[in-house]
Amino acid sequence: MINERNLHWGLLHGADYNYEQWLDHPKVLDQDLVFMNEAGINVLAVGIFSWAKLESEEGRYDFRWLDECIEKLYKNGQKIILATPSGSKPAWLSQKYPEVCQVDKKGLRRPHGGRHNHCRTSPKYREACVRINTELAQR
């Protein structure tokens, strides 16, 4: 919604940015910052598919890479939309709690993989989402 308070943003031009895919190649972020400026990118959604990088095993969180990414984007002039990572659950969650995966029309549990392969009615999935989202919010 546009109002007087956010008119100074001008046209929002951006995309999802999945920096976690490039953690083994730290120069990519610096190169991307240059490209973002050339393209006039001023807003980015981060963290969308990052659950496995944020919580590599149950209860073990690592936000350092996300902190670094957000700090560099902010210093480069981009606004940030911090997404929740619930659309792509980590493999450990599916392995430990198979009930978090969807069931197909034949009543068979779908294997881990793919986006949004989660059972929204699974108490374990909901609990895990609350935990990761709470950790992000508190961070």
Image (cartoon, rainbow, N blue to C red):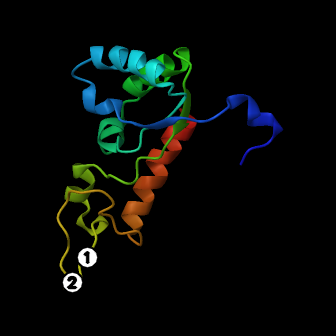
What is the residue that sits farthest to the bottom in this orientation? 106
Indicate the position of residue 104 as horizontal and vertical percent values.
23, 78
The quarter of the picture where residue 52 lies is top left
Q: Is residue 126 left or right of residue 78?
A: left
Q: Tell me if mark 2 has few (under 14), some (14-19) or many (20+) residues whose alpha carbon lies within 10 angstroms of its own.
A: few
Residue at 40 percent of width and 23 percent of height: 64
Dot 1 corresponds to which residue?
Answer: 103
What is the residue that sits farthest to the right in this orientation? 4
Residue at 31 percent of width and 45 percent of height: 58
Q: Amino acid at mark 2?
A: Gly
Dot 2 corresponds to which residue?
Answer: 107
Judge whether 135 appears above or below 112 on screen: above
Judge whether 14 appears above or below 122 on screen: above
The answer to whether the residue labelled 2 contacts the one labelled 1, judged by CB atoms less than 8 Å apart, is yes
CA gap, disc 2 and disc 1: 6 Å
Judge whether 9 appears above or below 31 on screen: below
The answer to whether residue 45 is visible is no
Counting labels gives: 2
Indicate the position of residue 72 as horizontal and vertical percent values.
47, 17
Q: Is residue 137 left or right of residue 100?
A: right
